[in-house]
Image (cartoon, rainbow, N blue to C red):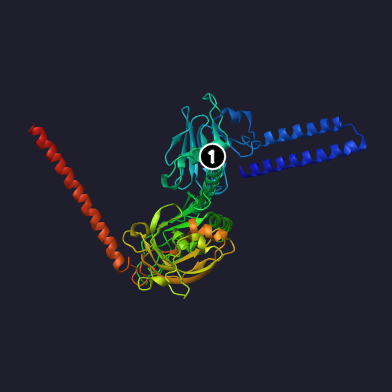
Amino acid sequence: GDAAMAELQARLQEQEQLKEQFRRELEQAKEMQERPDLIFKRRMQQKMLQDSALKELGGGSEEDKKLPHLLNLHEDSRLAETLVYPFKPGVTTIGKPNPADEPVIKFDGMGIVKDHAKVINENGKVTLIPGKSGRTLVNGSEIHTPTVLNHNARVWMGNNYAFRFVFPGHETDGPVPDYAFAESEISQKAGFGGGAAASLLNLDSESRNKLLEAMRKTDQANSLMSDMEKPIQFEPRLFRDRHTYTTEVVIRVEIKLPEPVSAGEDSPAILGIVPPPPSTKLAPELLWPWDMFTAKLAELTQLWDTWRRENEAGTVSEPPSLDALVTPGPQLLGEADLLLRPLSHMMDHTADPVLISPLGQPVGRVLVGIFPFNKLGRTGPWDDCPEQDPFVVKDEDLLNRTIEFEMRLRAVVLDVRRCSAAKDRGCRYERIFARYKIRLDDPDEPWISTSEVQENTFNPRLDFRQKHVVKVDDSMLKHLQSGKIVVQVFGTPCNGVDPATGKGPIGKHAKLIELDQKIEEKQKVLEALNKQLEERRAAVLRSHPA
C-alpha cells in the first residue's frame, strides 16, 4: 500500500514535470517558428501514456474489481481510487508487516498496528472486525465490535488510511463519497469541547477549517500514543478569544495517572508506565496553546519514528519515556478585567473580578485595586484629609497631565471545585503568579509580573504593588474612560499531592473539599425527603378528595 502510493506520487510528479517541459518547448517553438500543434500532439500522447501507467499501477485486475474491495481515498483527486484491496471469500487480515505472521493487506503508516483488523467475506456479507489496539472507523465512528460493511461505506484505519468500500452487485443510488466527505463526517460525529458543539455545520468556514486541522493532528498524536502504549489523550477545544473575537484552538492533554506508589519504592519512568512516586508533580490534565502542541507533535513524531525503526531492528523494545515532553510549564489559568473608569476621575477602586479561563469558564476571582497618588505622592483613603483627595469632576481635566497611580494585586481566590486535582487532592496548580499591562494592545509595553507563590493553595497571596506614571494624551484618556487592565493568572499544573506524604490535599483545603462533599450528601438526602413528602401529600389528597 505505502510503496504503491509512493510510486503513484512519483509518477504524478513526473507528469507535472512533463507539463512544465512541454510549456518550455512550446515557448521555444514560437521562437523557432516550429509548428506548435505537432509538439502538442506529441505531448498529449505522452500524457495519455502517463495516465494509463497511473491506472495500471494501482488499479487492480478486473477480477479483483468483481470482488468486494476497498478503494483508497485521497485529498488529491488524481490519486483517489487508484488502489484496490480485494476481499476474497474467507478471511483477509490487515495490519503492519509481520514476518512471523504476514497479513494479507500490509500497511506500515502511522497508527497501523499488528493484527490491526480482519475482514470476513462469506454468505454474501462482508464484516470488518477491528483488532484490540488499532484505530478503525466506519462512516465516521470508531468501531470496537464486528461491523457489516455496506456499499459506499467509508473506512479509516490508523491515522491516514481512508477508503471507500465497493460491493459489486449491491450498489445503491446516491452520490459517491470522496475524501472530503469521509473526513468531515468524522468531525461531525466526534464533536469537540466535551459536547460544546456537536457539528461542524454550526461553525463558519474559517473555524471549521481550524477544527478539522486540529482534529487531524490530534488523531495523529493519539495514534502515536496508542502505538507507544502511553496513557495520554489529546483533544481539540475551540474558544472565542476575548480580545480579538476570533475562534482559536487549544489542545487539552489528559494524562491517566495510576495511583502513587508508597514512599521509598522504586519507580521507573512515569510514562513507562508505572505508578508515580509521591513527589511526582506530573499533572493529570494540561492545556496547550496550538503553537505549543504543533511543536511538541513534531518532537513526538520524531521520537516515535526513531523508536519504531530501532524496535524493528531489534535494538530496543521498550517505548521511550515522554516525561520531559509532557512535564508542564506555566499555564494560563484565566484573565480578569479591572475597569479603568474610576481612575479617569482619580478615584480609588478595589474589585474582585471573575477569573475567566481560556475556555470561557469562571475559575475564581482576583483581588485587585488601583489607587491614584495626589500631588504629595500619597494614596488614600482620604476620610481624614478630603482636601488632599486627587479626585477630578471632569475626566477631560486629565488631558495632557501626567498622573501617578499604584496597582495592587492582593490575592487570587481559585474555585475549589474547578481547580482541584481530584476530589481527594489539593489545588491542581502551584507556583501561581499574575501579570498585567496597562495597554494590552500596545506590543511595546512590557508585561509586569508578580512573584510566584510556591505553596500549593487555592488562595495564593500575591501582596504585589507597582507604581505607574502615565502621560494622558487623547488615546490614553479614551482608554481611561472606557478601557480596562487585563490581569492574567498563571500556574504550573501539578497532581495536587503533598510531596512529603504522598497524600492530598493539604491542610484546610482538605477540610474545604470534605465539607463540600458532606454538603452535597446532605442536599441529596434533603431532595429525597422532599420527594417522599410530596408523594405522601399527593396520596392524602387522592384518598380525601375535597
Q: Quadrant of residue 512?
A: bottom left
Q: Residue at x 56, y 54 (%)?
A: 294
Is residue 522 found left or right of 4 in the rendered image?
left
Q: Quadrant of residue 279?
A: bottom left
**Image coords of residue 458 (percent x, y):** 36, 64
**Image coords of residue 145 (percent x, y):** 42, 39
Q: Residue furthest bottom?
A: 376
Q: Is residue 488 visible?
A: no
Instruction: Report the front residue among 253 and 74.
Output: 253
Residue bearing mark 1: 183
Q: Is residue 55 above or below residue 13?
A: above
Is residue 460 found left or right of 22 in the rendered image?
left
Q: Is residue 8 visible?
A: yes
Instruction: Report the front residue among 303 and 125.
Output: 303
Q: Is residue 118 above or below residue 470?
A: above
Q: Is residue 114 above or below residue 179?
A: below
Q: Residue at x 53, y 51 (%)?
A: 244
The quarter of the rendered structure image containing the N terminus is: top right
**Image coords of residue 421 (percent x, y):** 37, 60
Instruction: Report the front residue among 334 and 372.
Output: 372
Q: Residue at x 26, y 61 (%)?
A: 514
Three-letter amino acid code at the position of disc 1: Glu
The quarter of the rendered structure image containing the C terminus is: top left
**Image coords of residue 427 (percent x, y):** 37, 63
Q: Is residue 121 above or below residue 279?
A: above
The secondary structure type at the circle numbered 1 is helix
